[in-house]
Image (spheres, grey):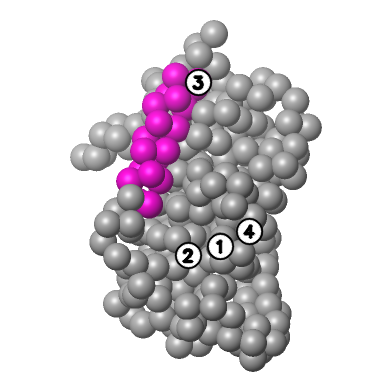
C-alpha cells in the first residue's frame, strides 16, 4: 500500500478534524507528529529516561556516598542523591527540548519535509507551529512522568510533590523548546544544530547547578550562570521537590521561564510565517 507524503497526511488529519465538532486545525499537525512518534518512541526512551536514570544511579548512589561522608555545606544538609535527582529532572527537560525542537524542525523545513507541504494546505504557519509545540510538550511531559515515578519509587519525593513537579518540568522544557523552534526553522546548515548542542546544551548541563551547587563556582561565573534558563529551571524544580522553595524566589524562577517561553513562541510564529510563506 502506498504511503502518503508527510504533508498530505498532516493535511488529512486537519481535514478530518474540520469535520468533527472540535475545529482546531493545530490538532491535525499534532496528530501527524504523534503518528510519527508511534514508530520511534522506543529509541527516544533511552535518551529521555534511561540516560538520566543511569546518571542518578551512578552519581547519586555511588558518588553520593563519598559526598555525604564529607557533609558539604553547599548541600544544606540534603543527601547528594536528593540534591542531584531534581537537577537531572530539569536537565532532562532541556535535553528533550533540544532533541525535539532542533533536528525535527530543521528536517521539516526541507523541500520534501512536512512543513512546506502542509503550508500549501489550509493549515497556517501558526497551526503548524502550535501542533508541533503541543507534541514537544507531550514528549517532555511523558518523560517527566516516567522520571517522577522513579523518584517516587526511591522515596526521593512524595505523591503531592511529584504532581507539582510535572508542570514545573513542563515549563522548563517549553522555555527551551519555543526559542529553539524559532531558531531552528531558519537554520540552513545542520552543522549549526550540532554546534548548539555542543556549545550551548552541554555547558548548561554541566554548569547550571545540576551536579553541584552554583555557590561552589567562582564569583564571576556564578553571575553568568544565574542568567541561564536551566539554572532557573533547576532551582525551581529542586526547591519544589525538596520543599525548600520560598514563594518569592519560586515565582521569580517560574516567571523567568514563562517569559522565555512566551517570547520564544512569538518569535517562532514570525519565523514560521517568514519561512513557510516566502
Residue on which the image places disc 2: 144
Q: What crowding class fits label 4: few (fewer than 14 Cα within 10 Å), some (14-19), or many (20 or more)?
A: some
The location of residue 4, given as percent across then percent down, is 59, 34
Mark pair 4, 1: CA separation: 5 Å
Q: Is 266 one of the magenta-colored residues?
A: yes
Residue on which the image places disc 3: 271
253 to 80, vertically: above or below: above
Quarter of the image holding residue 134?
A: top left
Q: Is residue 30 toward the left or the right of residue 39 in the image?
A: left
Mark pair 3, 1: CA separation: 38 Å
Residue depicted at x 29% and y 35%:
24
Which residues fall within the magenta stretch?
A: 253-272
Q: Are marks 4 and 1 in contact (CB under 8 Å)?
A: yes
Marks 3 and 1, the one that precedes in the sequence: 1
Work out whether residue 121 or residue 175 is closer to the camera in this orientation and state it. Answer: 175
Q: Which mark is residue 217?
A: 4
Amino acid at each position: 500500500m502506498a504511503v502518503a507524503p508527510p504533508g498530505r497526511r498532516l493535511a488529512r488529519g486537519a481535514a478530518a478534524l474540520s469535520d468533527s465538532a472540535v475545529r482546531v486545525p493545530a490538532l491535525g499537525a499534532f496528530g501527524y507528529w504523534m503518528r510519527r512518534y508511534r514508530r520511534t518512541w522506543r529509541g527516544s526512551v533511552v535518551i529521555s529516561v534511561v540516560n538520566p536514570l543511569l546518571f542518578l544511579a551512578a552519581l547519586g548512589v555511588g558518588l553520593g556516598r563519598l559526598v555525604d561522608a564529607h557533609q558539604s555545606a553547599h548541600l544544606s544538609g540534603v543527601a547528594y542523591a536528593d540534591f542531584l535527582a531534581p537537577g537531572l529532572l530539569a536537565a532532562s527537560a532541556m535535553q528533550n527540548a533540544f532533541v525535539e525542537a532542533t533536528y525535527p524542525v530543521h528536517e521539516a523545513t526541507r523541500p520534501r519535509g512536512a512543513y512546506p507541504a502542509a503550508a500549501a494546505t489550509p493549515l497556517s504557519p501558526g497551526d503548524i507551529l502550535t501542533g508541533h509545540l503541543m507534541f514537544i510538550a507531550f514528549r517532555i511531559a511523558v518523560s517527566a512522568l516516567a522520571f517522577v515515578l522513579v523518584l517516587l519509587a526511591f522515596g526521593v519525593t512524595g505523591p503531592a510533590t511529584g504532581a507539582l513537579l510535572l508542570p514545573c518540568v513542563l515549563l522548563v522544557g517549553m522555555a527551551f523548546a519555543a526559542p529553539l523552534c524559532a531558531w531552528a526553522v531558519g537554520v540552513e546548515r545542520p552543522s549549526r544544530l550540532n554546534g548548539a548542542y555542543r556549545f550551548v546544551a552541554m555547558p548548561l548541563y554541566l554548569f547550571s547547578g545540576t551536579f553541584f551547587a552554583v555557590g561552589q563556582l567562582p564569583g564571576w561565573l556564578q553571575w553568568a550562570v544565574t542568567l541561564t534558563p536551566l539554572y532557573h529551571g533547576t532551582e525551581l524544580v529542586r526547591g519544589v521537590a525538596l520543599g525548600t522553595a520560598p514563594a518569592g524566589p519560586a515565582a521569580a524562577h517560574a516567571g523567568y521561564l514563562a517569559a522565555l517561553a512566551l517570547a520564544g513562541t512569538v518569535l517562532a510564529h514570525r519565523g514560521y510565517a517568514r519561512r513557510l510563506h516566502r
